[in-house]
Amino acid sequence: VDTTCPWVSKVWTSVEKSKDKGHTAIIHGKYDHEETVATKSFAQKYLVLKNMGEAEYVADYMLGNGNKEEFLSKFSKAMSDGFDPDVDLACLGVANQTTMLKGETELIGKLFERTLIKKYGPQNINEHFLSFNTICDATQERQDAMYKMFGAEYEAPESKLYAELEGEQVGIDLMTTKNAEKLSSRQMEADSKGGGEVSGDIPAKVDMVLVLGGFNSSNTAHLLEIAEEEGITGYHIDCAERIGLPDGEATNRIQHKPMSTSPAQAMMDEGLEVTENFLPEGPVTIGITSGASTPDNIFGDVLKRVLAVQGLEA
């Protein structure tokens, strides 16, 4: 039985299409992430870019600014063997690690399309750029829901270089925009287990948030980052047993992974912190969210534990 996520499979198919066309695959992701390691295996030539800053660096190099030796050193762990930036950046296809931010992936694709239009002209762009929509909405929707929970809004990334190119190319439509499919993970997830939305009325103030998901989950870690960014106390746990004592007694104690601990450490139960009395006295409003692949039963188990700590029954 093939249980591969359909959005991950779509990324791999897109990368194979880039290879068949002789294009280099630009992969928006972390070069050592398991999903990106698998994605790289489908490409003949690839370059992995972690964020908008790295994408701008590459685009600027393509426009004749930069040093080749510095380039090769900077991306030594993130490119295919024998990669030559003076040759292998002429024809590109952009794909992504599905846990990355949707808005950033979209902007990276647009940046490279506009960069190639500047180099080769809009009449030749089809020979130099392949447009794919490989974005999984589940990650973005969860992050949007987190901001909504806190009464805040997601701020889309910006690129000074892209803004300059867009200003120069007024009236030129992008394949990246025109070819965007209306494929939403929300409906598929809702059909199977429920979408990533804030349920019910939004409280006036969330006192703390529990983030549920594997300690090696990139998209779960992003959710904790949002809580810290908004000044909300957050605890990342991977199971209900992190609440209370190891013997199962429901006490006001939580063992959790702080942002400073690496996933590898946390997976070995190293670098975890214990917070006593994590639930304050009196009424408290708790936000609960999870990574895209967290099973529903963990939600239920955690809720039962929290209620037990407060002396209540589910």
Image: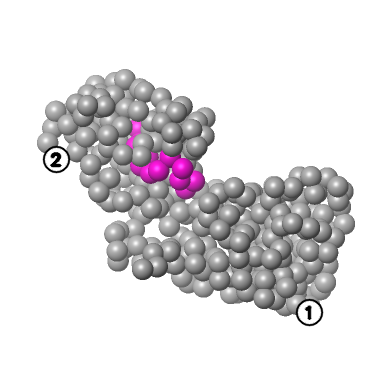
Whole-angstrom CA distance, mark 2 to mark 1, is: 64 Å
Q: Which residues are magenta?
A: 208-219
Query: Quick check: is 308 in the magenta stretch?
Result: no
Question: Which numbered circle lies on residue 198?
Answer: none
Q: What is the x, y in percent for residue 96?
A: 58, 59
Q: Is residue 161 visible?
A: no
User: Residue 171, image x and y in percent?
Assistant: 72, 72
Whether 301 is drawn above or below 208: the answer is: below
* Residue 2 seen by the camera: yes
Q: Is residue 210 magenta?
A: yes
Please, is residue 314 above or below residue 165 in the view? above
According to the picture, the residue beneath numbered tag 2 turns out to be 314
> Residue 54 vs residue 69: left or right?
left
Q: Residues within 10 Å of mark 1 (few under 14, many from 20)?
A: few
Left/right placement of residue 140 relative to residue 165 reads left
- Horizontal and vertical percent position of residue 197: 35, 53
- Look at the image and tell me in which quarter the C terminus lies: top left
Q: Residue at x 40, y 68 (%)?
A: 2
Q: Amino acid at mark 2?
A: Ala
Secondary element type, mark 2: loop
Please give the residue where the numbered disc 1 appears in the rendered image: 123
Residue 290 is left or right of residue 281, and the answer is: right
Query: What count of labels does the image hold?
Result: 2
- Number of the front mark, 2 or 1: 2
Question: What is the x, y in percent for residue 70?
Answer: 83, 45
Residue visible at 19% across and 38% down in the picture: 304
Q: Residue at x 47, y 65 (%)?
A: 7
- Residue at 86 percent of width and 47 percent of height: 69
